[in-house]
Amino acid sequence: MSLTSAGSGGQGGDERALVNFGGNRRWVARRYRPRDEHEVLEILGRHRSQRVRAVGSLHSWSDIVVAPDVALDMSAFDEVEHYAKDGRTFARVGAGCRLQDILDRLHATTGSTLPTLGVIKRQTISGAVSTATHGSGRPGISHYISSVRIAAYDHAGEPAVFEYRGGDELKSARCALGCLGILLALEIETVPKYRIAETVRRFERVEDALQLCQEHPLTQFALVPHGWKIIAWERDALPGTGAAGLKTRFFRAFNFLGVDVLSHLLLKASILLGGPAVRGLLKALPYLLLANQQRIDDAEHVLTMRHDLFRHEEMEMFVPESSVAAAAAVARSALAIYAGDAASVPPEFEAKLRALGLYDELAAARGTYVHHYPMLFRRVLPEDTLISMASGSNEPWFSFSLFSFEAPEKRGTYYGVCDWFARAMHALFAARLHWGKHYPLGAAETAQMYPALERFRQIRRATDPAGVFRNDFIDRVIG
């Protein structure tokens, strides 16, 4: 339906310099903070010949976050309403509401919580959904969205509000990359509050960690470079909530001070000191955690961390579960070669890499880069969307990441490593890349990743015939 408005459109907007969390994207745009749907529509009517995108917490590293001309700050859309329907419970939340605020309000007034969480809680719900944020052992947040309300354009090119409750339109809107329109509100299914029992385990082989994931579905694990040990966080869900006793408080303090803060300070120091210090720290890291000691706490405190305390950048790759052991072996060999160690690519993949020119490229880069952070592996169950990373398959996917904590201006070598990994993992294992993170591939590779991409393009064109909601990222990777 089309709407008109006499609203102020965010009081005219102002030119604003914007920078993302990673410090690798900086731009200037006219920024508005609309107060209601009428103002959003008025802004769209005013800027229909420019490019308009919503911005949230700016916790994306790819240029998906860049709003070339007009940026809409949707933080005034922060309502949270909880209700029951057909024997299930849901929350209708404003698009600009942060995950932490949603959790706080649900926990304070209901016995419900969100069905899954990513690592951080500072994202807006719209940003988390638009880029398919996920945790481990369940589908991502997008999968649980039951309806969306979006401001876009109708067939006549007039600003309008659309509400999707099913079909391909909803599947598309569940992970729309910001290019279906401006998200106004979302309905997400909630679940009873639950706790997590977590125990840190150490392994020598990826296969052992994968077996743990089968036995304890919420488990995630990390492959630690240079020592090549594996840290696994064995996790099981428990019903209900409990009072935070002494042991619970101790683990909260240890994980915040020891893991979130101290380990990252040591990491930053080792980067300044150089390769030998990085190697030494990572070889010691698996033995600095409290292994084989179970903690039980509310899910929010176990599943998340203060990932936002230190500026960094990340590229996250997704491979089918059946390929994850082989992908980890290639990744381990490649990082060892980059570090200058005596290592070679597993022979079963060497011929294909040679045919693509990737083997010689890797060999030429031997000794140029010492990776300084563990590769975190998380299992993501299939999602009912068109183009989220775990869509279009009956098989679970595993994500794994390459992080850099170097200053933005010093990440040139890291970007080269990411470029090689993206091409190699895509060629060998049909890997997909996280939309909101470093994304060095283009439209040709992206089209191969997603069988439903053309259907997504059709729906996008229907609500954005003039390309108002596109930006350079969408043009480059969607086409």
Image (cartoon, rainbow, N blue to C red):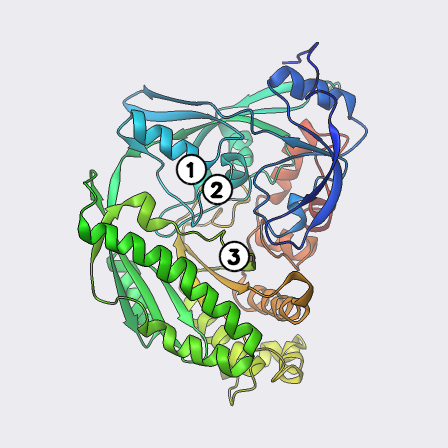
Give the residue type that dot 1 points to: Gln
Residue tagged 2: 122
- Sequence-wise first label, 1 or 3: 1
The residue drawn where x is 77% and y is 30% is 466
Residue at horizontal 50 percent and vertical 26 percent from the top: 78
Asked if the residue under mark 3 is in contact with the one under mark 2, i.e. CB atoms within 8 Å, the reply is: no
Label ID, residue 183? none
User: Residue 4 at what x, y percent from top left?
Assistant: 69, 11
Q: CA distance from mark 1 to mark 2?
A: 6 Å
Label 3 sits on a secondary structure element that is: loop
Q: Quickly name the residue at label 3.
A: 310
The answer to which image quadrant residue 280 occupies is bottom left
User: Label 1, on which residue?
Assistant: 100
**CB of mark 1 within 8 Å of CB of mark 2?**
yes
Label 2 neighbour load within 10 Å: few <14, some 14-19, many 20+: some
**Secondary structure found at label 1:** helix
Q: Position of residue 177 (x, y in %)?
A: 60, 40
* Distance Cα–Cα, label 1 vs label 3: 19 Å
Query: The residue under label 3 is which amino acid type?
Result: Phe
Q: Please tell me which residue lies in front, 309 or 99.
A: 309
- Secondary structure beneath dot 2 equals loop
Question: With respect to residue 180, does 303 lie above or below?
Answer: below
Q: Is residue 396 left or right of residue 75?
A: left
Say which of 80 and 165 sits in front. Answer: 80
Going from the N terminus, do you reach mark 1 or mark 2 first? Answer: 1
